[in-house]
Image (cartoon, rainbow, N blue to C red):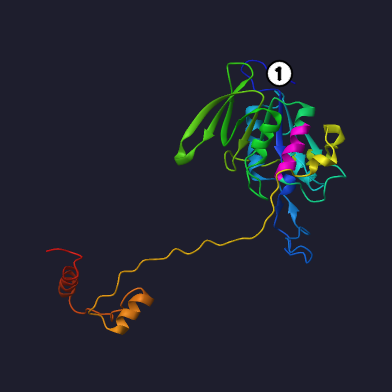
Amino acid sequence: MPRYQRRSIPSGCASALRAGQDLDATGPLSLTTETAALGDLGLVPVANPADLAALALIRAAVPAGAGHLTALSAGPAAATAVLRISLALGADAAVRIWDDAMPDSPPGPEVTARVLAAAISTLGFDLVVCGSHSLSGGSGYVGPALAEHLDYAQVCSVSHLESSPEQDMVIVHRRLDHGEREIVACRLPAVITVDDGATDIPYASLPSLVTAEEADICSLHLAGIGLTPADLVPRTAGKFLAYLPPRPRTKKSPPPEPSLSPLQAMQMAVGGGVRHPDRVIEGEAVKVAAEIIRFFVSNGILTK
């Protein structure tokens, strides 16, 4: 596993992209007749903004030539376009993990984390940076699951990354509630998750896009990362039974006054109160102001 020199970011970094799951709804939307699910025909795969923010964050911390940054994605052929975007934005290499034993649709977060963790263990990285949530589900499961599978340290909601005077350590800034920040010294190897909007995502230049289109993307199969088709079966997946909307809360209303007529009492119970006829005040400004003050005083809004 690559090491890094003092006052520098680790030389082996991975940006885990799950963008193969994320589809931009720019094409026609339809429900399949077999499953009543949203059909993906005509949809365009796009990169997850949180993953792009993670890529921009690590690229800013690791200047070109100071470390090797590899983009990983566990997804079908559509994920290739997303990996090329990562290459155009500064990644040094791209790897797509896929196998004929895997389903045509992107795997769930549990299987995605297991596949990415196996690939990271095979390739060997000091630092793994990924988006905290995906566009497709937003469960926030993959990052913590990666740290659990790899037995790495983990820091979530990172907005800034910098080097540390100590070896095998990075300093990260976490975004907390109410605008607060937390500075954490994290020992490597580690998994860091980045929220969408944590940093500005740069635009790729035209030469970078052309170079990325011509670049070779490495492919890994399950056997190459030590997995079998049996490892693709979710082990903790639940089954959706039914959706129950919340019960409306009962609203307590004061009892009607005894002096009200039955019609007025019914209006108060059904319409939220007795409706009084509108009154228009006309005349000079001084007279109108005096009448308004008298109305406020008589109804207890103002006191003399």
Instruction: State whether residue 127 is above or below residue 116.
Output: above
SS assignment at label 1? loop
At 72% from the left and 52% from the top, the residue drawn is 23
Instruction: State whether residue 37 is above or below residue 177.
Output: below
At 67% from the left and 22% from the top, the residue drawn is 10
Q: Nearer the viewer, residue 53 or 240?
A: 240
Amino acid under label 1?
A: Arg
Res. 249 image quadrant: bottom left
Instruction: State whether residue 39 is above or below residue 15.
Output: below
Q: Position of residue 162 (x, y in %)?
A: 58, 25
| Start-end of magenta stretch | 109-119
On the question of residue 155 being in view, the answer is yes
> In which quadrant of the rendered image does the C terminus lie?
bottom left
Count of residue discs: 1
At 76% from the left and 26% from the top, the residue drawn is 124
Residue on which disc 1 sits: 3
Q: Position of residue 11 (x, y in %)?
A: 71, 23
